[in-house]
Image: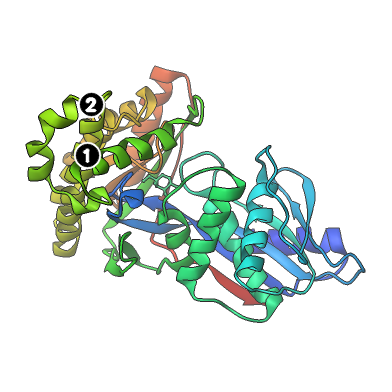
Amino acid sequence: MSVTQLMENARSVYAARFGVAPVWLAVAPGRVNLIGEHTDYNGGFVFPMAIERYTVIAAGPRRDASGKALLYSEIFDESGEFSLAEKDAPSAEVSWRSYVGGTVACALEKGLRPEPFQGAILSDVPLGGGLSSSASLEVAVATLVEAASGRTIDPVEKALLCQKAEHEYAFMPCGIMDQFISAMGEEGHAMLLDCRSLRRQSVPLDNPDVVVLVINSNVKHTLSGSEYPQRRSDCARAAQILGVELLRDADTAALEGARSRIAAEPDGERIYRRARHFLTEEERTARFADALRRGDYPAAGREMYDGHRSLKEDYEVTCPETDLLIDLAARLGLENGVYGARMTGGGFGGSTVTLADREKAPAAAQRISAQYEEQTGIKPSWFVTRPAAGAHLIEE
Ligand code: GLA
């Protein structure tokens, strides 16, 4: 669906529910990360781009005595009311309301004072596909709260407040990547973000012969939800043993020098491999960015395959389904227009990202999908995307 169509749908859903036309459309994209995975919370580099999949909220002022915000989720066909006078407390049960309520609460804490508003939330970012549907929801809500407050805040502050909402209301100790790119993506560009300084560089990805192909494995192995926090704490432990605040401040030589000391720790071998993923991923990300700037797509693609291997063997966040998607892409290879591929996002299922030749990408995607379905019995979904613009508000 095009964003124009999605916005049109949002207008109609809003009008049908509230009996008037919306006055604002808050739009925020999902993202795909090209490389630099599980590096943000270690202060490292990430290289995401916003995708042409969005959360859109059609909204307007709420003119009743409640003093609250009222939002309707089309996907869940449910409504929620959110306090604007004081911070709502987090609910133990996480749902779409947690992301909305958390963002509203954190925006209030930041000093935004919205007038009561009502809205209808629509999205074509697949839920649980590793494409940041939750960050796009948070950033769309924050954009709407800005509109209802009659002022905007610095987009970095906006990303940080959305990340805080995710930590405190969805209990997910995520890094800053997803909210940052959803808030600040730039059309035609990927973003090389230094997660320690939060300095960002826009890198053009506008060669008309090259596309980014996203394939959703349509599996989600959340296991227990403790895997992500466990990775974070393994990295924190590695940093502690190496005597640095963040793994960003260590290097491969320091890690290798400390290898026997780390191995002597409980779970030392695992902690060593986690740190090795981070440090080698930093190097791959730098090489990938250089290759992209030079237009050397085969070289960029090799870094993607290596990155996937590291996520599989050292970081252990891939799964048989995403591994299969990468193997199938690699088997097609350059002659079928595939430069490189890797899993993207947090892992344990979700999506893969493939850099591909524009003309050959659809045929490659169809072949990968058919073989994947044959071997797993699961139908994947895929789409090709250009780097999209970050969050914005449309006043009607
Ligand atoms: C999730 C988190 C991000 C990042 C990725 C892994 O998407 O929300 O902050 O850590 O996983 O790179």
Q: Position of residue 48 (x, y in %)?
A: 35, 56
Question: Looking at mark 2, is its residue's CB closer than 8 Å to ligand 1?
Answer: no
* Rendering coords of residue 258 (x, y %): 11, 36
Count of all numbered marks drawn on residues in the image: 2
Q: CA distance from mark 2 to mark 1?
A: 9 Å
Mark 1 is on which residue type? Ile
In the rendered image of this protein, does residue 130 appear above or below residue 199?
above
Tell me which colouring the rendered structure shows. rainbow
SS of the residue under disc 1: helix
- The disc placed on residue 251 is none
| Nearer to us in this view, 362 or 275 | 275
Q: Position of residue 222 (x, y in %)?
A: 50, 29
Question: Is 278 on the left or on the right of 145, as rendered?
Answer: left
- Residue at the extreme bottom: 150
Q: Amino acid at mark 2?
A: Glu
Q: Are marks 2 and 1 in contact (CB under 8 Å)?
A: yes
Identify the residue position indicated by label 2 in the image: 265
Q: Which mark is residue 241?
A: 1
Write down the quadrant of residue 386 in the picture: bottom left
Whichever of labels 2 and 1 marks the residue nearer the N terminus, that label is 1
Question: What residue appears at the point 66 percent right and 46 percent down from the top-left corner?
Answer: 96
Please tell me whether mark 2 sits on a helix, a strand or a loop.
Answer: loop
Q: Is residue 336 visible?
A: no
* Residue 194 in view here: yes
Asked which quadrant contains residue 351, the reply is: top left
- Mark 2 closeness class: few <14, some 14–19, many ≥20 residues within 10 Å: some
Residue situated in front as seen by the camera: 62 or 224: 224
At x 70%, y 43%, the residue is 91
The residue at 52%/67% (across/down) is: 158
